[in-house]
Amino acid sequence: MTRHIDVEVVGFARRLAAAGVDVPPTRVHAMIEALDVLGAAGLRPVYWAGRTTLCGSPEDVAAYDRVFAAYFGGHPASPPNRVAVTPVQRLVAVPAEPDDPGGRDGDPPDAPEQRIATANRIEVLRHRDVATLSAADRAEVHRYVSALLPAAPDRTTRRLKPSPSGPVDARRTVRSMLRHGGEPVELRRHRHGRRQRRLVFLIDVSGSMAAYAETLLRFAHAACRVRPGTEVFTVGTRLTRITRELRRREPAAALAAASAVIDDWSGGTRLGDELKEFLDRWGQRGTARGAVVVIGSDGWERGGTEQLATQMGRLSRLARRIVWVNPHRGYIGYIPSTGGMRAALPYVDRLVAGHSLGAMHELAGLLDGRLDSSGKGGDRAGGHA
């Protein structure tokens, strides 16, 4: 199943929720898994995969049929056993340019030429710097970023839970024996449980990050949607916690609510002071302990770099991993020359790009379970940047 189909499913689920059907994220994931098995070569498997997973009661079927027809077919819904098998329409139709063969007058909306041009256009946008995009292209990229499913790696918990394999659970085994007259009928076993690590975002909203801040905030909102325990802060001339605002389901509403509480948009940058405030008020008390911390900034520091180095040292002793997302990292020959980056780099585990849709995809993959492949501290960015 491609990411393209995942984005279509998410968009369809949003339309369905707007029509009054309760569509929690678990049902959306179930539909994606169903399409992995059935395939999405035509409307019939898409229809039944969605109806089986997204409809929670018979009352939802009528709304489902109506939204499905409008979203995928553009005509009244046919009975389930007569759903036409046609190519699935893409979620996003990039506006055709004058020289685009897919935008000629008279072509049907699902013409092969247009689908090829749309796919090529999306692939081009994937690698372009969002700061150089037009407003329409940037909105297109933001819609794809909002559909990402970033997650944090798991950690082992102290609590033990029953398991078919692992060490023998003596207490449960003895209780089982007592229920069977003292006979050792079965050895009960247990193992440590797994829990996902907390994900914490610190996003720079200063003037030098103005072109990239919204993209990073949309990525953080996607993480909040997948993992409710995610924490999000903005830094600039002040520290602002926007976790509550980003818990809204719709990206536009979440970004609007966050913008209303951020008072230092496009201002200066005092990373060291804001990081100290974060650690004193939240991080030291548990928010950063064992967490994966993602800092989105270009490293321009208006204050002293000594403060930033000191606070990064504190953060590195609390967090499991520190991932620094620098938009300029995506350019060939980039060297972290700003004072802030040089001060922070010895404490950073990963220094990654954050300038494009492709960079956001790579960041989501980096956070999704593969970050803990080596021990903490063994891959500091300062050793190879």
Image (spheres, rainbow, N blue to C red):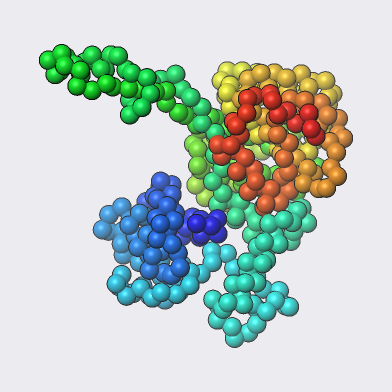
Depth order, front residue of 256/160? 160
Residue 185 is left or right of residue 278, and the answer is left
Q: Residue at x 69, y 48 (%)?
A: 359
Q: Quadrant of residue 163?
A: top left
Q: Residue 228, position in %: x, y?
A: 49, 36
Residue 316 is left or right of residue 112, and the answer is right
Query: In which quadrant is the C terminus drawn?
Result: top right
Residue that sits furthest to the bottom in the current view: 106
Q: Residue at x 47, y 58 (%)?
A: 9
Q: Residue 82, position in %: x, y?
A: 32, 75
Q: Residue 122, position in %: x, y?
A: 65, 62
Q: Residue at x 73, y 48 (%)?
A: 355
Q: Residue 300, position in %: x, y?
A: 82, 35
Q: Residue at x 42, y 52 (%)?
A: 33
Q: Quadrant of residue 352?
A: top right
- Residue 289, can we see it? yes
Q: Is residue 29 above or below residue 229?
A: below
- Residue 207, can we see it? no
Residue that sits furthest to the left in the current view: 181
Depth order, front residue of 143/252? 143
Q: Quadrant of residue 327?
A: top right
Residue that sits furthest to the front in the current view: 184
Depth order, front residue of 384/345? 384
